[in-house]
Image: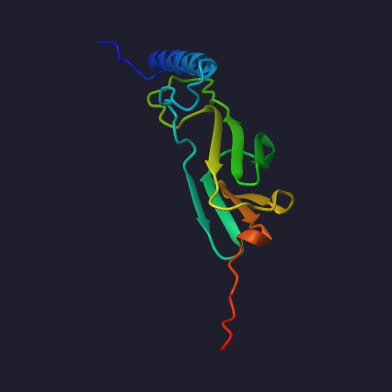
Amino acid sequence: MARLGWEPLAGLWREMENFRREMDRLLERWGWEGYGWPSLTAGYPPINVWEDEANVYAELELPGMALEDLEIYVTGRNQLSIKGERKAPQVEKGTWLRQERPFGSFHRIVTLPVDVEADKVEARLQNGVLTIVMPKCEEAKPRKITVKAV
């Protein structure tokens, strides 16, 4: 009895993702940007975003990737854009039995809750975790108001 592994389905998933991208492009031309079909890798890589008084932080799990394989931008003072590509692993002398880790290009755009200083953003990739520190603009930082007695 022949075993059906993941390998025959990998091509199908790739074709479905290509079809989804083409449909998104078509819908965007009609002004339906953002109303496309859900991506097969929607929400990849997962991202955590939090803030304190001085900074906004973003954290993504990117095992096996190098910082030079990523493009990180802050646009419009409050849009974080992260692009990258995880290359498909190659098995030289074997057959895939299971392949669950996603690969391919990704692009995440996150609207930040406040404006940040784009020229002061720092990113570090350590142990497969990308951490981005984005200092808040002075106007976005909380200010203590002194109450005067009258």
Identify which residue, 137 or 38, lies in the foreground.
Answer: 137
**Left or right of residue 23, residue 58 in this image:** right
Residue at 46% across, 18% down: 17
| Residue 62 seen from this side | no
Image quarter hosting the N terminus: top left
Q: Quadrant of residue 43?
A: top left
Residue 85 vertical position relative to residue 116 in the rendered view, above or below: above
Task: Look at the image and name its color scheme.
Answer: rainbow
Please identify the quadrant where the C terminus is shown: bottom right
Query: Does residue 113 show up?
Result: yes
Q: Nearer the viewer, residue 96 or 78?
A: 78
Question: Looking at the picture, how far across and down is residue 125, in whole percent?
Answer: 62, 48
Q: How many marks?
A: 0
Of all residues, the one furthest to the bottom in this rendering is 150
Q: Residue furthest front?
A: 150
> Outermost residue toward the left?
1
Could you tell me which residue is drawn at 55 percent across and 37 percent down? Answer: 109
Q: Is residue 122 above or below residue 70?
A: below
Query: Quick one: which residue is furthest to the top in this view?
Result: 1
Residue 58: x %, y % from top left: 55, 50
Along the viewing direction, whichever of 78 and 64 lies nearer the viewer: 78
Residue 148 horizontal/vertical position (percent)? 59, 85
Residue 67 placement (x, y as % from top left): 66, 41
Pick whichever, 105 or 54, lies toward us.
54
Q: Residue at x 70, y 49 (%)?
A: 118
